Image (tube, rainbow, N blue to C red):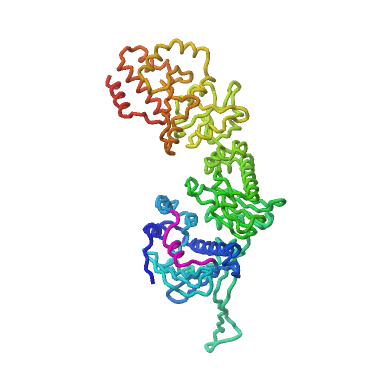
């Protein structure tokens, strides 16, 4: 017998799961049955694609049994799936696949810890068994191998591995139930939980139990009705591929239950889309939009949510090519009639049938989003709250569907509450407005308070508030919307639309002032100009029309592009401001230098950007305040 310690992460994860993650302990059964279903999926696939296993004939099934007599109650879950070898047991049950799992779980709030949908999303659902069991035994034999192995643990830091006996391939998990788990050694509890969580598992689930009946016609020696115990084995799930059934046969409740069972979510989906396509390419898709964004939506190694089947045979749930990455939050099933069963990831990327299914699925989903935005604005607002940002990614990654996406994405506004569409912005435009104006970079509150908005408010022009970190990239890629140019008000070009004749006069009169400020700031700025858009603020920074914004520069640097040439801002000054008038009136070069530097740094701070030299800023500010 080998005695092994869990990796540190597993020990800590077990404590998190056992003591704080679940309020619904019952979902342990869902996890273990789902694992059995996955093992059957894998073996069914291998019997079609692996030469060594093609001769293997088996009827896939999952069996449950329990003992309720005596002090030690047990619950057993067995399958005839792929099974595990010695190394598989050690790797799969002794380590965690994703290094980010423990970190994420540790950061959860108390409310989130009570959300029982989380565990399955991490691929560590097996450990939920320790919530109801003091000891767990796993006997497994891998298909194609003769030797079986037994894995045993109490979940307290270590496990043992030893040789064992098992008839045929597959895995048998025996839970030695603790006091809190003893209620699950019960026929009615088990049946109820299977109906609730695993009814649509594609394989039959059988429950073995002893049924006791009493015959009043026959009496024992004491005159009591004769007791008869009959051993029964019954199938307790429907085991049908729900997505293959006609829509008119399915209820809303059945759709929702299938989603919860297949996506490890306890909440209802926001909505779903069920499609059956016939013709040159035959396939069925059932897509769900979750009520909440998946926890790993912004991880580089996010787990895709769509499973691929070929003629009801499970192929993969780990392929990011099934849908574009900006739709990575979609959950569900694609079942094709035309793909080869031995399809590989490389083939998927190049396969014409898969390409057709993918393109049609994207169009169907985007069309459904558009329909909901028009017919159910309240539901669409919930959708946007969760998935607006990934949709925006599609604007620069999916040019073919760019027009559809432009109608779907939403932005905050300087004049409206909540989110607005580009179409609704266009409807509200005033007669003399020549472009769609927007401002990017920084948080929403910072942008709404930006001095740059002053003149646009005065003219009654709405400005889109683009506060997402990718808005700088996507706004540039949009260019125009229905022949209207999009103009960033934090770039120098947008100001031309606001200029009047009197602004030209102001600029002529302020030539001396501009010369003073330029001399004081030197190489810190690209240019100094008289502002046509400031009303209350003394100054504001913008960038040249063809230069990246300050925030865009920060994004590029965070991506490792450190060799970028420094882009200097343009300082726009308000010649009516008292501080600017002091610069104009003074001949003290040191005083002017302090005022101009503070003016520039204040303008940067107002846009949510740190001054280049905060210590110098503090010194100059102190000097001015002292005077």
Q: Position of residue 448 (x, y in %)?
A: 47, 30
Q: Position of residue 253 (x, y in %)?
A: 61, 56
Question: In front here: 524 or 384?
Answer: 524
Q: Residue furthest right?
A: 279
Q: Residue furthest bottom?
A: 221
Q: Residue furthest left?
A: 626
Q: Position of residue 66 (x, y in %)?
A: 50, 72
The verdict on residue 85 being magenta is: yes
Whether residue 445 is visible to the viewer of this picture, yes or no, is no
Q: Residue at x 35, y 22 (%)?
A: 597
Q: Which residues are magenta?
A: 82-98
Question: In front here: 426 or 528?
Answer: 528
Whether residue 142 is visible to the viewer of this picture, yes or no, is yes
Q: Quadrant of residue 423?
A: top right
Q: Residue furthest front?
A: 51
185 left or right, relative to 364: left
441 left or right, relative to 598: right
Give the position of the N terminus as an image quadrant. bottom left
Give the position of the C terminus as an image quadrant. top left
Question: In front here: 134 or 520?
Answer: 520
The verdict on residue 64 being magenta is: no
Q: Position of residue 202 (x, y in %)?
A: 60, 62
Q: Residue at x 53, y 73 (%)?
A: 168
Q: Quadrant of residue 615?
A: top left
The answer to whether residue 455 is above or below residue 475 is above
The answer to whether residue 220 is above or below residue 576 is below
Q: Residue at x 58, y 74 (%)?
A: 233
């Amino acid at each position: 017998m080998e005695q092994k310690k869990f990796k540190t992460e597993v020990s800590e994860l077990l404590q998190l799961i056992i003591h704080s993650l679940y309020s619904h302990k019952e979902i342990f059964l869902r996890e273990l049955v789902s694992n059995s279903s996955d093992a059957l999926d894998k073996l069914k696939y291998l019997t079609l694609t692996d030469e060594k296993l093609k001769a293997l004939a088996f009827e896939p099934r999952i069996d449950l049994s329990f003992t309720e007599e005596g002090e030690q109650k047990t619950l057993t879950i067995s399958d005839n799936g792929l099974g595990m070898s010695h190394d598989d047991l050690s790797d799969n049950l002794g380590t965690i696949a994703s290094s980010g799992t423990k970190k994420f779980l540790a950061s959860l709030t108390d409310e989130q810890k009570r959300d029982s949908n989380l565990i399955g999303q991490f691929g560590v659902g097996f450990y939920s068994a320790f919530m109801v069991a003091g000891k767990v035994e796993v006997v497994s034999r891998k298909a194609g191998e003769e030797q079986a192995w037994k894995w045993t643990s109490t979940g307290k830091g270590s496990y043992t591995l030893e040789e064992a006996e098992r008839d045929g391939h597959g895995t048998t998990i025996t839970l030695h139930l603790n006091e809190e788990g003893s209620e699950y050694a019960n026929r009615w509890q088990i049946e109820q939980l299977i109906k609730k969580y695993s009814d649509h598992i594609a394989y039959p689930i059988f429950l073995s139990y002893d049924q006791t009946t009493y015959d009043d016609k026959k009496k024992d020696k004491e005159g009591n009705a004769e007791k008869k115990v009959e051993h029964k084995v019954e199938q307790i799930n429907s085991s049908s591929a729900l997505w293959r059934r006609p829509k008119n046969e399915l209820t809303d409740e059945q759709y929702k239950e299938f989603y919860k069972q297949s996506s490890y979510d306890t909440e209802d989906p926001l909505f779903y889309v069920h499609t059956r396509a016939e013709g040159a390419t035959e396939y069925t898709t059932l897509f769900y939009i979750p009520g909440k964004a998946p926890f790993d939506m912004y991880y580089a190694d996010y787990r895709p949510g769509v499973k691929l089947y070929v003629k009801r045979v499970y192929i993969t749930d780990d392929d990011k090519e099934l849908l574009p990455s900006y739709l990575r939050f979609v959950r569900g099933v694609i079942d094709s009639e035309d793909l080869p069963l031995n399809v590989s990831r490389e083939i998927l990327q190049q396969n014409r049938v898969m390409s057709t299914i993918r393109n049609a699925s994207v169009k169907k989903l985007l069309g459904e989003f558009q329909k909901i935005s028009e017919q159910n604005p309240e539901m669409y607002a919930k959708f946007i709250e969760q998935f607006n940002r990934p949709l925006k990614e599609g604007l620069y990654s999916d040019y073919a569907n760019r027009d559809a996406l432009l109608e779907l994405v939403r932005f905050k506004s300087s004049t409206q509450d909540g989110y607005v569409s580009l179409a609704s912005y266009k409807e509200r435009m005033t007669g003399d407005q020549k472009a769609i104006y927007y401002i990017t970079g920084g948080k929403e509150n910072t942008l709404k308070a930006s001095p740059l908005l002053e003149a646009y408010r005065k003219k009654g022009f709405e400005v889109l508030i683009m506060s997402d970190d990718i808005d700088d990239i996507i706004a540039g890629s949009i260019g125009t919307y229905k022949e209207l140019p999009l103009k960033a008000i934090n770039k120098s070009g947008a100001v031309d639309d606001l200029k009047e004749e009197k602004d030209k006069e102001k600029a002529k009169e302020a030539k001396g002032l501009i010369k003073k400020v330029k001399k004081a700031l030197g190489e810190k700025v690209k240019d100094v100009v008289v502002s046509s858009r400031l009303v209350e603020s003394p100054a504001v920074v913008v960038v040249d029309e063809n230069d990246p914004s300050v925030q865009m520069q920060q994004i590029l640097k965070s991506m490792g592009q450190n060799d970028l040439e420094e882009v200097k801002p343009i300082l726009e000054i308000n010649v009516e401001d008292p501080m600017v008038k002091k610069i104009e009136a003074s001949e003290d070069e040191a005083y002017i230098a302090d005022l101009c530097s503070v003016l520039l740094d204040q303008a940067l701070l107002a846009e949510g950007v740190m001054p280049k030299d905060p210590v110098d800023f503090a010194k100059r500010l102190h000097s001015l305040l002292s005077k």
